[in-house]
Image (cartoon, grey):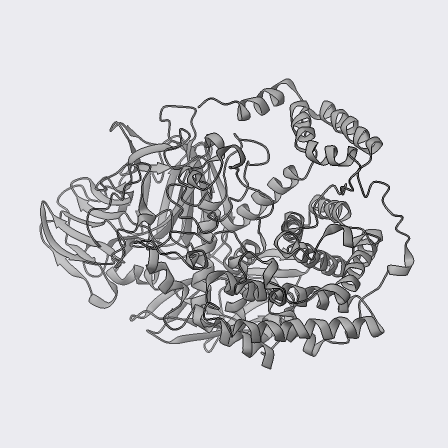
Amino acid sequence: MVKVPLTIQNEAGVQLMDQAITTGVPLPKGLVHDPDCLALFDEHGNKEVQCIPLSRWPDNSFRWVLLDFQATLPARQNYSCFLDVVESASGEKMQGIVIDEQESALSVDTGSATFVLDTERTFPFTAVYGKKRQLLKEGAGSIQLRTEDNRIFSPGIEKLSVELAGPLRSMIKAEGVFKVDGPGNLRYIARMHFFKNKSLVRIDFTLWNKGAARHAGGLWDLGDPGSILFRELVLRFRAFENEVPATRLRVEGERGFVEYPGGELLLYQDSSGGENWKSSNHVNRNGEVPLRFRGYRVYQGESVVSEGLRASPILHLGETSEGVSATIAHFWQNFPKALATGKEGLSLYLFPPQSADLYELQGGERKTHSLYIDFNGSPESLVFVHQPPRCIISREWYALTETVAYLSDKATEGDRSYDKLLASAVAGEQTFFAKREIIDEYGWRNFGEVYADHEAVGHDGPTPLVSHYNNQYDQVYGFFREFIASSDSAWFQLMDELAHHVADIDIYHTRQDRREYNNGLHWHTNHYLDAATCTHRSLSKAHLARYDARFYGGGPGLEHCYGTGLLYHYWLTGEEASREALLTLADWVMKSTSEPDTVLGAVYHIKSLLPQWKQALAGQRVRADRFPLTRGSGNPISLLLDAYILTSDRLYLDRAEEIIQGCIHPGDDIDSRDLLNAETGWSYTVCLQAIGKYLDVKLGQGEQDYAYAYAQASLLHYAEWMLEHEYPYLEKPEILEYPNETWPAQDLRKSCVFYFAARHSRGEMRERCLAKAEFFHNYVIGKLNEFDTRSLARPIALLMQNRWMHGWFGGNRDVDVPICVTKHEYPRRKEEFWVAKAMVQKVVAGFVYALKKTSFEQERAWLRCRKKKY
């Protein structure tokens, strides 16, 4: 028997009755193949649990499972239970949620309420029935979008599907379009969660501009012609036919509910309420900050009856024992927001009309809000939304399962040294939470983002430099690792909020732009420059004062693409948005790393290589690698491996191998790569780390084939070179443009490469690699402690991801893996450097491939995306 202890933390000041809990749990390879063999127990005995496999090991056993169960959580206390493996299922089928699918309608019976959805009518429900009475009349629910010119549109449901049919929690997905003027690019996706014996529904509503930005000149500013402007988006429930019953509102935390007479009430959050609430972070397309006042106000009619800074509200209509309650998660953080009740019913404003400006949803941009409506609950039934319980699993269990690479079961002395360096991220005055306040990193587009304070070093302007960290490194993954190692829920909060931001804002959700941009990940904000009106899209017209417009511009690129954090976020939370985001990025990488599939694309690709070919024809040595030995290959390799781990789709692994064999070779002339030029060559270590990760995946599959041997030999070839040539970057500060704290943090990557090489070598080579790995590991600790700037976002991000291998090797120093170096021959590539014949062959091959793949419509689409129309 194997017991997995689970601890549920409840920080709310009230007891949460039969609270629905959803959490991912990792399992060791070979332990469980049947979800019915998992049982949950607490001090009172066996509990009902819903178990859904999220991922499997190569032997088809469960790698991660998603648990749903309900538990009563005492106020401000922990609740303990454990997951156990039983020999066989009880044979009794759990009674729970019943979904009835008909031709044009669908109903969900939770046991406490029945929700009716009709695919021929508008979203969300046509009716809601309780056990004794009808909770929502037919046609009494609606969602409306008001355009710039005050026209109102309600969306239809194009597709309604059951994504999860479980006895304790079920999920229905609705998709449709707002038929505003234009090509129908304004769409929505809504996931509705239903819970056993609950009249509660959670709606994750995503508004999506699926069109492309125009980004003239490669610039991505607000005000782009591809943006959609609108004035209001509201979800309404007319739950009461006559006078509105007693209205109770709890605005902030522990203040309790206040009853308001008269029925009509509006709570409106105009800004974050923070000291820097008018930060230039909130500029609109005109370069103006349209916020009117600090915090929130509560209105009855035209009168302000209450005001404050940051609202986390619950609005309740009805008696004290039962009624309708509603709220929006992360209410003040995602301002502007509003809740209201009155003649039009209960209104949840995702984008309220009280704002002084229109809302702009950029091309390829999404925004998801989570709404909670309890149609027959007490006022306190939604307290958990603003103080959600957290599930904690011990570090020892994570390490035992080996589902997280290179995690030791306990902290070593070296780990504790890094713990001290990282402590400022969640405790003290320099936390990531405190840094949000500097530029007011809030609002519906910004919330969840990390402030890039390292970009502001040396800034002396009258206001703080606005810079967003998104996607310089995979901080979602870093936060995840710190959470499971420390059990500190602050790390979970950072991970969860950033994962949602990345999935919505940072990914370019469109198929109407260039192939190399569609569904890609936007870069971080341009270095050392204020974001101005480019929001999270890097390149702004405001930056042209520093750049020549002829050589400036761009969009999503492979050097910054990360999926590991999204993978673990999905496994830990079961959030489908993170799973979809990972696979969206993986498919973008697949397209971006394949040869052009249009003739025009082939011509354009040839044109981009002209400078290299001119050098080659002039007799200069120019490398002919298909892919670069940089993060531009390393990050795509890693992301493809994540997609393969999630789906077991061999296409992702095959492409990863293709990139590896196109960027590196066991017989490379390494000196010709100029890797010691730190400013241009430093990221080769990112690529070598990805190759190490690839070898781990192949070991897990039990595959020691040619591709494995090729990658292993290449890694060792470069490790031998590094043993002789690599040094800490700051030993030669004169060759660095900015000799700052980032460089020793980057040195930690070298430690990781040496640990990978040690794992794949024997004898003297292994000992030399281990010694060098430990040297760099210890050097980074000492050097970073010399910097007052060691707590900036960039070095912290690098430490979170790269600090783990040292501790793991302390207990696994002599673990052997198969070495295949002597089993294969690796003839040197004929075209390691460009020659005229090879160039001609490449051109011909590219045209032949494009001719086989293209069509007239594809050629038109390629031209349309690049035609200058602005």
Q: Where is residue 216 in the image (x, y as percent from the top left)?
A: 46, 30
Q: Nearer the viewer, residue 570 or 420?
A: 420
Q: Is residue 439 above or below residue 658?
A: below
Q: Nearer the viewer, residue 98 or 326?
A: 326
Judge whether residue 412 can be spotted in this image.
no
Judge whether residue 208 can be spotted in this image.
yes
Residue lying at the far bottom of the rendered structure:
413
Q: Which of 535 and 74 is in front in this view?
A: 535
Q: Where is residue 308 in the image (x, y as percent from the top left)?
A: 18, 58
Q: Position of residue 758 (x, y in %)?
A: 76, 69
Q: Position of residue 457 (x, y in %)?
A: 43, 59
Quarter-wise, where is residue 120 in the image? top left
Relative placement, left or right, of 221 versus 811 is left
Q: Is residue 867 above or below residue 310?
A: above
Residue at (44% x, 34% y) in the render = 363
Residue at (58% x, 66% y) in the render = 744
Q: In which quarter of the image is the C terminus?
A: top left
Q: Which of 204 and 101 is in front in this view?
A: 204
Quarter-wise, where is residue 319 in the image? bottom left
Q: In which quarter of the image is the N terminus?
A: bottom right
